[in-house]
Amino acid sequence: MDKPVDRLDTRASLARTNVVGFNTIVIREFNRIIRIWGQTIVPPAITATLYFVIFGSLIGGRIGDMGGYSYIQYIAPGLIMMTVITNSYGNVVSSFFGAKFGKHIEELLVSPLPGWLIVGGYVVGGIVRGLIVGGVVTAITLIFTHMKIHNVGVVISAVLLSSIVFALAGMINAIFAKNFDQISFIPTFVLTPLTYLGGVFYTIKLLPDWAQHISHANPILYMVNAFRYGFLGVSDVDVRLAYTIMIGAAVVLYVSCVWLLHRGVGTRE
């Protein structure tokens, strides 16, 4: 029979191994983001600048106020959230699929690191990239317009939950993808349309009733509006419902990722 002290030492050793493994994944993801900053940070910054110049300054002046704010102020939170969503998703899908393609995902799978920590490490990497790029876009936003914050807690929690949801969605895409075409299909034909139709550039109150009902089936609508509420205090949806959807999606996607990794779907085939 093992002594209690030996069992405690074993647990402590395993805990240290888990911490080291988790930190290694996060640090590797962070270094990857910074190493290829010309691909991870610069393009979103340029794209956001063009959006503000074209939609905010040139077209926005002719549109007038929206939701009680100038058009450029109204779209600013949406543009920031759109950047966070796409970059959180893109970081995980490309990094995890790259690990599969390079055949070094096996090193993680045979390590004592549990699946839930592996998923957590990649998700944190996606959050880091989303927040870094989101911070850059926020700085660009301040060049074009003044931004006030209605509720700091809503701003922080909404951006974190949205980043978690799409980092997990990116991992599921990477798990099932068998080639590089399949990791670009979802962002191009699903994520981008949902983002543009998610209330980033307009209030859905401008749409006819049937279009408003369809828009409510778009999860990004709730994320964008929760984030916008944090800045401006206005929203097209019930913010409590938005949080319910974001938290529910995060839990379901996280459990799904851990289960798929445990079953070896896409990684042991």
Image (cartoon, rainbow, N blue to C red):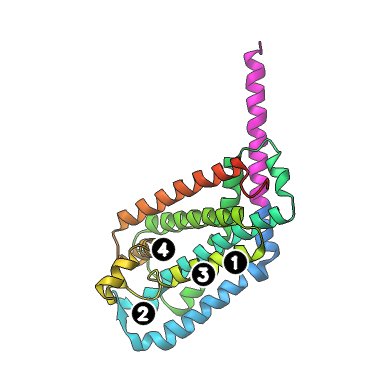
- For the residue pair 258 and 48, the one nearer the viewer reads as 258
Which is nearer the N-term, disc 1 or disc 2?
A: 2
Q: Marks 2 and 1: in contact by CB < 8 Å? A: no
Residue type for callout 2: Tyr
Q: Main structural element of the magenta stretch: helix, strand or loop? A: helix
Would you say residue 3 sits in the magenta stretch?
Answer: yes
Disc 4 to disc 2, how far (Cα)? 20 Å
The residue most toward the left is: 209
The residue most toward the front is: 269
- For the residue pair 56 and 265, the one nearer the viewer reads as 265
Q: Which residues are magenta?
A: 1-27
| Residue at 55% across, 57% down | 170
Compared to residue 121, the image places residue 44 above or below, namely below
Q: Which residue is mark 3?
A: 189
Could you say whether the residue bearing mark 3 is in a helix, strand or loop?
A: helix
Q: Which residue is mark 2?
A: 71
Q: Nearer the viewer, mark 1 or mark 2?
A: 1
Q: Residues within 10 Å of mark 1 (few under 14, many from 20)?
A: some
